[in-house]
Image (cartoon, helix red, strand yellow):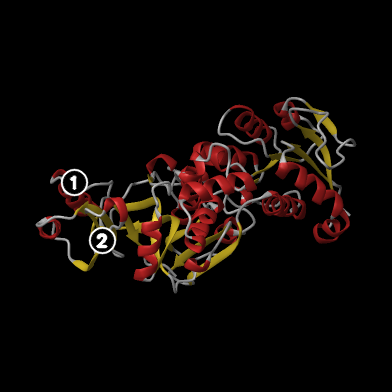
Amino acid sequence: MAEALRVGIAGLGTVGASVARVLRDKATELTRQCGRDIVVSAVSARDPKRDRGVDVSSAKWFDDPVKMAQTADIDVFVELIGGDEGPARLSVKAALEAGRHVVTANKALLAKHGVALAEIAEKKGVLLNYEAAVAGGIPVIKTMREAMAGNSVTRVFGILNGTCNYILTRMEAEGVSFDVVLKDAQRLGYAEADPTFDIEGHDTAHKLSILTSLAFGTKIAANDIYMEGISNITQADIRAAGDLGYRIKLLGVAQRTESGIEQRVHPTMVPTASVIAQVHGVTNAVAIETDILGELLLSGPGAGGNATASAVIGDVADIAKSRPGFQHGPVFGRPAKELKPYKKAQMRSHAGGYFIRLTVHDRIGVFAAIAKRMADNDISLESIVQHAVSGEAAAQKTVILVTHETTEAAVRKAVDGITKDGHLTDKPQVIRIERAG
């Protein structure tokens, strides 16, 4: 049997402790599967005295993760610190430069420095594995890197943030407001005390940028993603979507167009009959469209200690199965030096159309003025519905428009015109309607 694979874990939070626990509890099974033992030989965290529910006393303790990354006592450096700078970046870089394999769950680090780190890994002939960085326990990275040889990806999209999906699911099922569900999600641990990173789309954008690089062979461009969150989604939107046969999901979408690559994160209406509309709660889903395979949908637990730990351990096991002299595949599916510069797509027609909700003064001429603004911008309407607003706002009406294929620019120009006309009593809502499997 080959020598044991020595693992160093940096960060012993929920995920790190779960990784250490599973490596201990499943040691016999992992040895059988990998052909060698996997042992935790070193750990690094802030507080050596904290009880983490797992005994790591047999591992060498390092206060400094960079020192642990450089030590000869480990073969694999597992980074679970988090953050795109500081100890996370310095320790991963140090481990790769020292010829150590690296496993990370850090999407923020990869979104900002992934290409540079990949170049080091490929130069040193070591693995940089990151299955846990995107969609938790769903093996989407392995699928795209290894199982789709010969396929040309045309579009990748999905539900990549469990917090947002949980909130939207509860809002629809229980008819409660965004704020109420968010507070409950925080109480249950599904949302952070400061939920901005999740609910405004940043987490989804980081994950999408990594999938974009894998799908289209481009350098990661996390800063070139159009992004909207879900904080402005109301019960009026949820109800209207249901009446029209749609369900609202926060999607990350990347697709190849004639003018470049389009990346966007935003609330989206998807047909209730589509598969992705059936993904509820904290579950994630990723759809990949290719020329040979067609559409592949992967769904499963997207977050949490066990799901993330499962992905980390899968990456460690892959390293344990490799042998000296084995030529490792490139980190992002193509050699890092051959990744093309990201070319942002120009504004284009959106095949699914748009949902537009306007709260307007209930007075003569408003409806005609809205229709004129749409016509002036060459926007064809599939449907237009008016609802009276009851109670104190009885002098208002809700107007819901569904457009045929049009451009983002045209919709925004029309809505801006309606706003300037002074007809609105509340902020307009614009949601894309997506073709989804």
Asked if 119 appears above or below 289 in the picture, the reply is above
**Callout 1: SS:** helix
Q: Nearer the viewer, residue 404 or 185?
A: 185
Please report whichever mark, 2 or 1, sits nearer to the chain's N-terminal start. 2
Q: For the residue carrying disc 1, how many other residues have a C-alpha within 10 Å: few (<14), some (14-19), or many (20+)?
A: some
The structure residue drawn at horizontal position 62% and vertical position 53%, both measured from the top left corner, is 136
Q: Which of 171 and 149 is in front in this view?
A: 171
Is 241 left or right of 1, judged from the image as shown?
left
- What is the residue that sits farthest to the front in this orientation? 391
Nearest to the observer: residue 374 or residue 400: 400
Determine the residue positioned at 49% across, 39% down: 196
Residue corresponding to mark 1: 419
Q: Is residue 13 above or below residue 256?
A: above
Residue 16 versus residue 158 in the image, above or below: above
Q: In this view, does 122 lie to the left or right of 370?
A: right
Q: Does residue 209 appear left or right of residue 433 in this picture?
A: right
Farthest bottom residue in view: 273
| Residue drawn at point x = 17 percent, y = 52 percent | 414
Residue at image mark 2: 388
Label 2: state its secondary structure.
strand
Question: Where in the figure is residue 133, as x and y percent of width and height?
Answer: 59, 47
Which quadrant of the rendered structure holds the C terminus?
bottom left
Indicate the amino acid at tag 2. Answer: Ala
Q: Residues within 10 Å of mark 2 (few under 14, many from 20)?
A: some
Where does the image place residue 372, in percent across and percent down from the top left? 10, 58
- Residue at screen point 55% across, 50% down: 163
